[in-house]
Amino acid sequence: GESVGLHLPTLSVQEGDNSIINCAYSNSASDYFIWYKQESGKGPQFIIDIRSNMDKRQGQRVTVLLNKTVKHLSLQIAATQPGDSAVFFCAESYGNNRLAFGKGNQVVVIP
Amino acid sequence: KAGVTQTPRYLIKTRGQQVTLSCSPISGHRSVSWYQQTPGQGLQFLFEYFSETQRNKGNFPGRFSGRQFSNSRSEMNVSTLELGDSALYLCASSSHSGGSWYEQYFGPGTRLTVT
């Protein structure tokens, strides 16, 4: 498969445990934030998004938290499964359908 | 509904050559964005097309160009290839027409290797 990235921060998680992935964004004017998951050989896949007027949003097994004061975004994955092994990217949108991506975090789920 | 498709999936070129990559968006999507993904720089925005017009452009040299056709299919071209252009090139489509951001759907990418 494709090599998504080298030297990425890696989070090793035991199957069934919760995962927390952190991201610092750069632009205080960003009004939309997205988490993507990228598996080997595939393009990024949308997980969850959040607008800047919110500080928390929940999806299925995932929660995104936004702290605009410190420009920090986090993704919480509940009951991590082997299929969650991937690279996770945060992205910020600062207008007009343009995304700026973070470097990515590699999540490795240990069975 | 079919997803975003990109062709070719893999490509090997030599320095100095040029290359054209193709992207077919999801049916009904009029916005197509291109990104370059490398281990060192991560995912970087190249440009976005909407209704055959380039609407946004990232910080890449003029060797990188693109276009969009009336059926929303898009191509990107890289001229005078350099070794540093080796990357995964991703295309994303959305139904975005203006204003707030809309979800982008990514294709599998084209892996370009420049030797």
Image (cartoon, coloured by chain):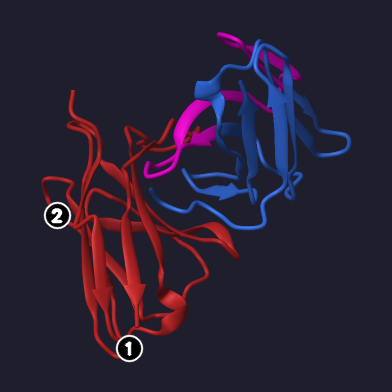
Chain colours: A blue, B red
Q: What stretch of residues is rendered in magenta?
A: A36-64
**Residue identifier under label 2:** B69
Discs 2/1, front: 1
Question: Along the horizontal axis of the image, is A111 left or right of B95?
Answer: right
Q: Is residue B39 above or below residue A75?
A: below
Q: Residue at x 43, y 42 (%)?
A: A40
**Mark 1 Cα shell of 10 Å, populated few (<14), some (14-19), many (≥20):** some
Image quarter where the N terminus of chain B lies is: top left
Q: Quadrant of residue B24?
A: top left
**Residue ranking furthest to the front:** A111
Q: Residue at x 53, y 34 (%)?
A: A36
Q: Is residue B5 visible?
A: yes
Q: Is residue A29 above or below residue B77?
A: above
Where is residue B74 drawn, in percent x and y? 21, 55
Mark 1, secondary structure of its residue: loop
Foreground of the two, B59 or B41: B41
Label 2 to label 1: alpha-carbon separation: 28 Å
Q: Residue at x 50, y 51 (%)?
A: A4
Q: Residue at x 32, y 32 (%)?
A: B95
| Residue type (three-letter) at the residue carrying disc 1 | Arg
Image quarter where the C terminus of chain B lies is: bottom left
Q: Which mark is residue B15?
A: 1
